[in-house]
Amino acid sequence: MNELAKKSAIAIAGGALAWIAIRSAIRASRRIEYAGRTVLLTGGSRGLGLEMARRLVEQGANVAICARNASELERARLDLEGRGGSVVALECDVTDPAQVDAAVAETERRLGPIDVLINNAGIISVGPLETMTFDDFDRSLATHFWAPYFATQAVLPGMRARRFGRIVNISSIGGIIPAPHLTPYVAGKFALVGLSKALRAELMRDGIYVTTICPGLMRTGSPPNAEFKSQHQAEYAWFVLGDSLPGISVSSGHAADRILRATQNAEAEVVISVPARVAALAESIAPELMSELYGIANRLLPGPGGIGSESRLGRQSESALTRSFLTLLTRRAAQRNNESAN
């Protein structure tokens, strides 16, 4: 190695070490604890949302969860209160700004000013593009883009007045890479990533830190409640198998821990799971190659047919394969995370 190369290597190493030290110092200065904080969590009645709510309660936070299903909310409330938490469960359609404003006001009335907002509510519809309708795209954008926007606008005045706040937007690896057979979902999650990153840039000056979360496949137990079109049994099979296999997917508990740690440290963006990080890196450095691979993947997925643009829930799309030992972890997660009840 010549002298110039050695100096360059030393400079690069020195710069990397300096950045690591600066980043550690910044995170330490911004770190918060959850004890005594008020947290509003959308989509908190089941799945990943419920996992996060459990951890928040156990760490002493005052937690408000909201969702549309009253019976799911009640089961989640009992679960959380059984862990000793101060919990408010609110029935709310997060795509309706009036209901969101009311949920924020009720949370602050009962628990105090909101310190942390976690936009977690989500929907997913799986199938080929030919079977997706305007309504599928409209619902995805309403849930994944407009709902976080409404909730953020509702909490911002109070956070700005106190010059303190944390806003967490749960997007997806589908907000970074264009996964086939999930086009409305991908469109909504891409929009959320853009909104979330722009909000962070503008709100830091007010002491408000926005964190963008992009998980890969997680074993939350949610596939029974997802929607499937066309050859719905075949679509459900590939989806739930990928969701179930260790190494490809991560547990919802692991994801919840990572998200809450990122929130504490006011991190900018977190991609969860090794496969998701690899995919995101590959997309950034080799987009042409990745587009070819997505096209190949699309050809391997079920084609149009079956029930067409109609939808069936995952629990209505079961087969011998999806009831086999291969999906055991997802079925266990569904029971644990309030996903299995009709």
Image (cartoon, rainbow, N blue to C red):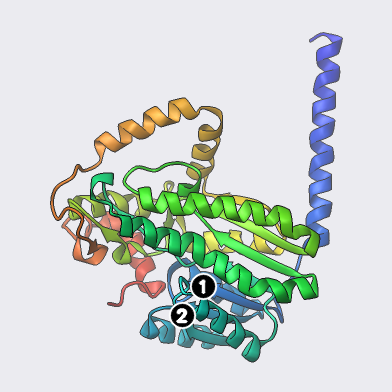
Amino acid on which disc 2 is placed = Cys
Amino acid on which disc 1 is placed = Thr
93 over 14 or under it: above or below: below
Question: Disc count in the image?
Answer: 2
| Residue farthest along the top direction in this orientation | 2
Q: Position of residue 330 (x, y in %)?
A: 35, 61
Earlier-in-chain disc, 1 versus 2: 1
Numbered circle sitting on residue 92: 2
The residue drawn where x is 31% and y is 67% is 225
Q: Quadrant of the C terminus?
A: bottom left
The residue drawn where x is 80% and y is 30% is 13
Circle 2 packing at 10 Å, graded few (<14), some (14-19), many (20+), is many
Residue situated in front as seen by the camera: 164 or 101: 101
Q: Is residue 271 visible in this depiction of the protein? A: yes
Numbered circle sitting on residue 7: none
Task: Look at mark 1 in the image and give the residue it sits on.
Answer: 42
Quick check: 291 left or right of 164?
left
215 over 92 or under it: above or below: above
What whole-number distance in Å separates the C-alpha atoms at marks 1 and 2? 9 Å
Q: Quadrant of the N terminus?
A: top right
Circle 1 packing at 10 Å, graded few (<14), some (14-19), many (20+), is many
Q: Position of residue 259 (x, y in %)?
A: 59, 61
Residue situated in front as seen by the camera: 166 or 141: 141
Q: Position of residue 26 (x, y in %)?
A: 81, 54
